[in-house]
Amino acid sequence: MNSLVDNVDGGALAAAWLELNRLVELRPITNEAEYDRTVTLMNHVLDIMGENEQHPLAGLLEFLALMVSIYDKEHYSIEEL
């Protein structure tokens, strides 16, 4: 098995996910409303972080930006000339 998952406490992981989901409902972006909500959350996280790239929320910001980027590429791609 993978040593990374061997050391994960499933109960603690479930509790952490439930709490995070209660706060921000992280899901893949499938429509404009979810896109707008995710961009709003991303901007709020940026406001909280300020200039601190080592902020504890940096990983969350990176994840949100990735989700927004994926949606952008699928729905707003600019055709190459």
Image (spheres, grey):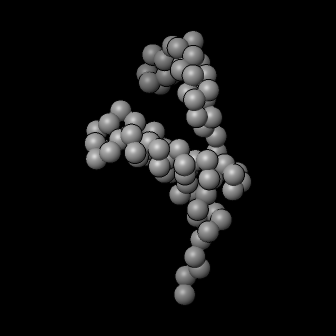
Query: What residue lies at 61% left-to-right and 22% top-to-bottom?
Result: 18
Residue at 28% across / 47% down in the picture? 51
The image shows residue 23 at horizontal and vertical percentages of: 57, 29
**Outermost residue toward the bottom in this view:** 81
- From the top left corner, tell me how far across and down residue 72 is, in percent: 58, 62
Residue 35 visible in the current orientation: yes
> In the image, 64: left or right of 74?
left
Q: Residue at x 47, y 44 (%)?
A: 44
User: Residue 32 placed where, x, y %?
Assistant: 69, 56
Instruction: Give the quadrant of residue 70.
Output: bottom right
Q: Which quarter of the figure is the C terminus placed in?
A: bottom right
Q: Is residue 37 left or right of residue 45?
A: right
Asked if residue 10 can be seen in this view, the reply is no
- Across and down, in percent, residue 28 comes to 64, 45
Q: Is residue 79 above or below residue 41?
A: below
Q: How many marks?
A: 0
Q: Tell whether 56 sits left or right of 38.
A: left
Whether 31 is drawn above or below 81: the answer is above
Task: Determine the image quadrant of residue 52.
Answer: top left
Viewer-nearest residue: 10 or 52: 52
Q: Residue at x 52, y 14 (%)?
A: 12
Residue 33 in the image: above or below residue 24: below
**Depth order, front residue of 50/27:** 50
